[in-house]
Amino acid sequence: MPKKYLLIATLVGMVAVGADYVRAKEARFSHTYAEEAIPETGLPKVVPTHPRLLIRRDKWEGGLSLAEFRARGKLPKPPWAKHTGHARMLALYYLSTGDTSVVPTVVNLVLKSTYWPGYGSDCALAFDWIYPALNEAQKKALIDRLVKYGYAAAKFGERYSCLYSHYSYRPPSDMLMIGLALDGEHPDAKKFQAWAMGYFKKNYFPAWQRTGGGWQGGGHAYYRYAGDPMILAIACWASATDEDVFKLIKQEYGNWLEEHMYFLIYQMLPDKTRVDSTGFDYAPDFQICKDQTIMLIARGYKNPDGYAYLRWMGKEPKKNWLLYDAETDAKKPLFPDRLPLTKLWGRDGFGYLQMRSNGWEPDSTVIEFKCGDYFWSHNFLNQNSFYIYHKGRLAIQSGFYDSYGGNHFDHYYSKTISSNSMLIFQPGEFTWTPIRRPHSDIDEEGFFPEPGGQRVIAWGAETCFTFREFLSRSHSKQHFETGNILAFERAPDFSYSYVCGDATDAYNNPKYSYGVKGRKNRPKITRFTRSLAFLDRKYLVIFDRVDAVEPSYRKAWLLHSISKPEVRGTLISAKVPGHIEDFHGDEVIITYEGGKLASPEKNGRLFIRTFLPEHHYIRRIGGKGYEFYSNGKNRPLCRQPPDYCKQETGNWRIEISPSKPAKSDVFLHLLYPCDSNTTEMPKAELIVSNDKKMVGISVGGWVVMFGKAGEVDGTVRYRSLGKAKHLVVDLMRGVKYKVNGVEGGSKVIKASEEGCLHFTTAEPGIVTLTPMK
């Protein structure tokens, strides 16, 4: 095996051992592709001629014919001409020119290769594309090699393959493309098709429907191992058969594939670097996917937004001679001006929301929110976390993926303490790793203290071969159910966007607390919900309810930054002067002062004001030697990021905690992203209903109110300070309310199915909401 794969293979083996251990106790689920196969009699009809993968010999609606492609290929210096040592690229050169002189080289490259996930797909493409130029001996040798690779893919995949991981996607993709390439040439071709298509339809398609098309498997560093090969295989499925698989996914699986293209588009920030909070990563400018993936989905759905996005990125789709479609390009795109400013992926699974103030314009604010399932061991423990960009990264996911394991990874990067979520500190709470790392303050059994965050889930869906198994274990064993979107609503004009997430299950709680090797944690919380309201695309209000099992468990509201936060308040203690300090105060200012990434002309600034808890203190932690402080020590990187890796790792965090111990606390914050020339936060006031069941904020001509203890089922009264738009949430869903004090007099307004009322007032006075049951 090549040296560059040794480390990867070691980690794959570790995961496989964990997977085998769990599967032994889950015998009722399928563990082979044969068990997931569709009947061969139900397979789609395969195009009888070669080429058939991505391109056909004859004219067809979904793409280019060979003649059309060769007409394009007559342009000087095709991009694949220089790839003399790559079978797939040389085969593409033959396909575009008809130059048979490269065919023997392609054959030798395939025959000399050794199987590794992904090689099967490349070899299948090469075989299909050079097929007309092969003699019988060459043809037989390549067919034998591809059949061998098909079975090797099945063996690898059945040991390691899972729903939400990286290398897991390559084996079934290899089998599918090999089966399609060999159809009519070998009897096992139908078997490979049945195994792969059955696995895709029964597992990958519903699994991705659960994510809404969002990518959940360990950040974008691993995307090229998973998303790219899967999309390529689906496109080959469409080109080689009479089954419109793109249409099938749109009609029967929640249109996740087209939504996936939009997820990739929304992952780009206005400065054309990526968000970096969806999973372990290498760099925000690390290539999120090959342009090929965007091109394949855009062509499959005749959707010009993919082309418009690539051009916005400075890339010309017409240069992709194989995949460019003029009919698609002739349509008017929605990107960037007409795409939704607020969008949610996977409400019942992935739970990822993004809100933008001005699309992809340089002055746009981008806010992320995450609350959903746990998918695999390269996910952050960051449910109910947020991320804010405005002319620079202002509230970030901190740390750097310097290795899978080690001091920084174990104690900081993979933990909740590195995210903008909530910590609840319980004495004696432990976390665990299945891989012994003596250098990371981990004992010989793999235990170490949990720094206040969400419960450990040692392995995620990489221990699940089928989607049915994943669903069964969402509420058993590791309990992959870690978060739910309770409510989501946006105004048609995006004047407000609202979301509420429940991340209680992400922590040790009475329903489930993590245990391993005879030890078990105790429950520490009974509730953690977080609501975000983005008003006029300017003001972000965050409201949290946190109920701890014991009053003594300290709660800490987290926000991470690259630059040092300015705390407007009084220093009350300094555990380490300049590095760990506590303040009395309500306001924090963070200014983006530039970093490794693109720096705009005017840097962004974030104001944070705490309204609740009424009595609280602000702890500021960071600076040189304290950037990644956790479990009583700094947890520095095991290795520094290489030059190409522009991750902005973070240097500081603030923790906002109640001054008085209590089982239940609510946190109410106003966050205001703006330019650095803004020196003061907008005026805002706390509003409390007469019965104290609702609390909220008045700011910028808006009033937003939240149920202090959850859904409010009675009459609500509060004072409006003047002309304002009101957003009242946590009301009874679908119930009509008589609203007094609104503009124009009393009105009957029906609460939305998300429990929201929206109305306006013209002057100061009492607003009364009376349910009409």
Image (cartoon, grey):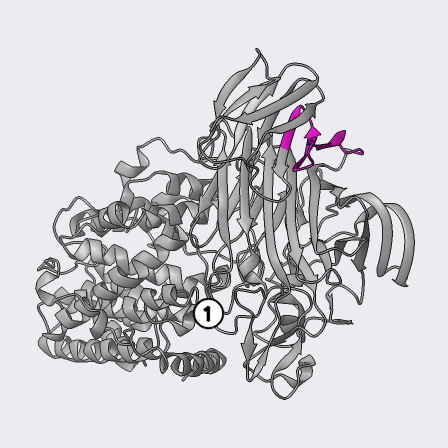
Q: Most extreme residue toward the front, as rendered?
A: 773
- Residue 295, given in percent of the width and then of the height, sits at 34, 48
Query: Label 1: which residue?
Result: 460
Residue 559 among those drawn in magenta: no
- Given residues 32 and 347, the one toward you in this image is 347
Q: Residue at x 57, y 12 (%)?
A: 745
Question: Is residue 287 shown left or right of residue 295?
Answer: right
Q: Which residues are magenta?
A: 679-704
Question: Is residue 595 shown left or right of residue 529?
Answer: right
Q: Most extreme residue toward the bottom, as rendered?
A: 444
Q: Residue at x 56, y 82 (%)?
A: 435
- Given residues 41 and 446, the one toward you in this image is 446
- Residue 281, given in percent of the width and then of the height, sits at 55, 62
Q: Which element type, helix, strand or loop, lies under badge 1?
A: loop
Residue 684 among those drawn in magenta: yes
Would residue 420 be visible to someone looking at this image? no
Quarter residue 309 falls in: top left
Q: Residue at x 44, y 65 (%)?
A: 475
- Given residues 506 and 134, the one toward you in this image is 506
- Residue 710, given in percent of the width and then of the height, sits at 58, 43
Q: Is residue 335 above or below residue 245?
A: above
- Residue 63, given in percent of the width and then of the height, sits at 22, 47
Kind of residue at disc 1: Gly
Question: Is residue 414 shown left or right of residue 261?
Answer: right
- Given residues 96 and 680, the one toward you in this image is 680
Q: Residue at x 57, y 37 (%)?
A: 712
Would residue 357 be visible to someone looking at this image? yes
Q: Is residue 92 above or below residue 248?
A: below
